[in-house]
Image: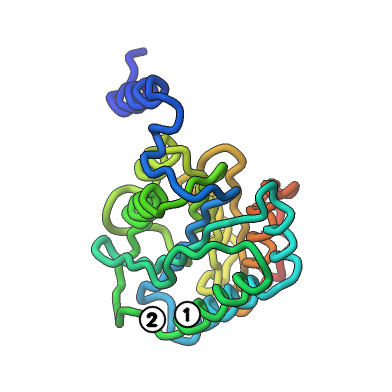
Amino acid sequence: MARSIGTIIVAVLMAVLADLPAGKAHAEQGVSVDLELLLALDVSHSVTVDEHAAQINGLAAAFRHERLISAIRNLPTGRAAVAVMFWAGPENQIIAVPWTLVDSTESANSLADSIARETEPPWDGLSFTAIGTALLRGADEIDSNGYDGRRRIIDLSGDDPSNQGVKAAEARDLVVLRGIVINGLPILQDRKEHEDREALVRYFETEVAGGVGAFVLPTLSFNDFPRAMLAKLITEVSGRTPSVSPLRMLAGMPAD
């Protein structure tokens, strides 16, 4: 059977990257860290002001938690570079918290303080959800951030499938070719039926997450976001993969 044009394009891109000298695929060589982590948070219309604040407060609390700080300090160099990006429609991505070197309790707390100041969403009433475009913007930010990480990850959270911009799976494949892993945190707040919850988790598994060791960790609500985000960050920083599949996690969650 003849290969599709998409398959041929991917094969050509992989061959080009393989021919590049070591390090050239990551054009920006800079400060050495173990991990470059871009946290991409959904701020589209489906996320209320209160829900956005819950995301922000949960993320800030995670970087104040001793378990996450210890996980970073236990890395070979004890350093991670972290930034926070807000995203919504195709034209709406913004770096809310710039790239920050985390290598101590003090720097982790300073990052948490910067995150905690972002409780007001940057846009009002944007209904579009452009996951693919957000992934491509996130990859550009990682490539140009001035850090040189052994691992590079985009951690994307959202409560709906993409409905605008570049298709999520197409963007995912291009980002993975750039040596970046994508992990997903589907938020099931507005999905009361198990079938609807399962559909969003499967979407994140098949269309969003990608790369070696990529995983999806669902959370039932924005109120549960702090627990889920802390668990996800510790897993990412430690370089582990959850032993339980996201659908099995979902099966163990309460019905409402």
Q: Residues within 10 Å of mark 2 (few under 14, many from 20)?
A: some
The residue at 28%/58% (across/down) is 164
Mark 2 or mark 1: name the one nearer the start of the chain: 1
Tell me where residue 234 sits by quadrant: bottom right
Three-letter amino acid code of the residue under disc 1: His
The residue at 39%/34% (across/down) is 25
For the residues bearing labels 2 and 1, Cβ distance under 8 angstroms:
yes
Tell me where residue 141 sits by quadrant: bottom left
Count every numbered label the image shows and give the total: 2
Q: Identify the residue under disc 1.
A: 52
| Secondary structure state at the residue bearing disc 2 | loop
When the figure is inspected, residue 173 is found, relative to residue 60, above or below; the finding is: above
Three-letter amino acid code of the residue under disc 2: Pro
Q: In what quadrant of the picture does the N terminus appear? A: top left
When the figure is inspected, residue 20 is found, relative to residue 111, above or below; the finding is: above
Residue furthest out toward the front: 31
When the figure is inspected, residue 113 is found, relative to residue 75, above or below; the finding is: below
Cα distance, mark 2 to mark 1?
7 Å
Q: Residues within 10 Å of mark 1 (few under 14, many from 20)?
A: many
Which of these two is toward me, 47 or 144?
144
Residue 186 lies, in percent from the top left, at 54, 61
Report if residue 199 is visible in the image.
Answer: no
The residue at 61%/79% (across/down) is 223
Q: In what quadrant of the picture does the C terminus appear? A: bottom right
The residue at 70%/65% (across/down) is 69
Residue 193 lies, in percent from the top left, at 57, 67
Say whether residue 56 is left or right of residue 161: right
Residue 203 lies, in percent from the top left, at 49, 51
Q: Identify the residue under disc 2.
A: 121
